[in-house]
Image: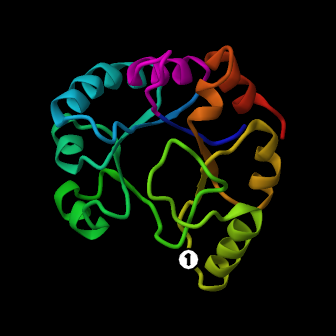
Amino acid sequence: MISLQFITHQTERYSYLESARMALEGGCKWIQLRMKDAPLEEVEAVALQLKPLCKEHEAILILDDHVELAKKLEVDGVHLGKKDMPIDQARQILGEAFIIGGTANTFGPFRFTTTKKNLSPVLGLEGYSSILSQMKEANIEIPVVAIGGITFEDIPAILHTGVNGIALSGTILGADNPVEETRRIIESDL
């Protein structure tokens, strides 16, 4: 079974909450609530609705950027980007019980994606293979999740690089039936 992280996205068809709900219904066990330019109050309102849904589906819920809010709402963790709070500072605030994910500055997306601004250079398969090889040589053991414009057809080759999982948004939300597309990805024998 594929380790899939779903990154919420608002489209013309779906709200942030609806996008997460569909991924959960499709069997996804890891949701990142990402509402980049939304006011904090709106992020909190959606997170409060999403938290019980994640609990019901036995899924992990992490917030993008909002360390203090993650602590206040007692979600599972946060994801920090290049311009967010430093990871060590977030760890001081959150303690050891929370998951802290981070965007590595040397990592770029798998390919160009419209859901993310200010992209690092595109990595492709060779980039992920190279980074994972360097990590192995340096005895660095942290989970690596591939992200950025990944399609269903890309998944087998990406997993072959040794990444621990994939993060998707547009591939799922662009499908005719996002719930079924999530299920197809997770249950595929790639």
Depth check: 119 or 45 in front?
Answer: 119
Residue 139 sits in which quadrant? bottom right
Residue 40 sits above or below residue 89 on the image = above
Depth check: 122 or 142 in front?
Answer: 122
The quadrant the C terminus occupies is top right
Q: Is residue 3 magenta?
A: no
Q: Is residue 35 left or right of residue 143?
A: left
The residue shown at (62%, 52%) is 112
The quadrant the N terminus occupies is top right
Q: Residue furthest bottom?
A: 138
| Coloring basis for residues | rainbow
> Magenta segment range?
8-27
Q: Position of residue 128 (x, y in %)?
A: 69, 66
Q: Position of residue 117 (x, y in %)?
A: 44, 51
The residue shown at (56%, 35%) is 169
Three-letter amino acid code of the residue under disc 1 = Ile
The residue shown at (45%, 61%) is 103
Q: Secondary structure at mark 1?
A: loop
The residue shown at (19%, 41%) is 69
Mark 1 crowd level (few <14, some 14–19, many ≥20, 10 Å Cα): few
Depth check: 177 or 138 in front?
Answer: 177
Residue 36 sits in which quadrant? top left
Q: Is residue 25 magenta?
A: yes
Q: Which residue is mark 1?
A: 140
Q: Position of residue 163 (x, y in %)?
A: 67, 58
Q: Position of residue 157 (x, y in %)?
A: 82, 53
Residue 112 sits above or below residue 190 on the image = below
Q: Is residue 156 left or right of residue 16?
A: right
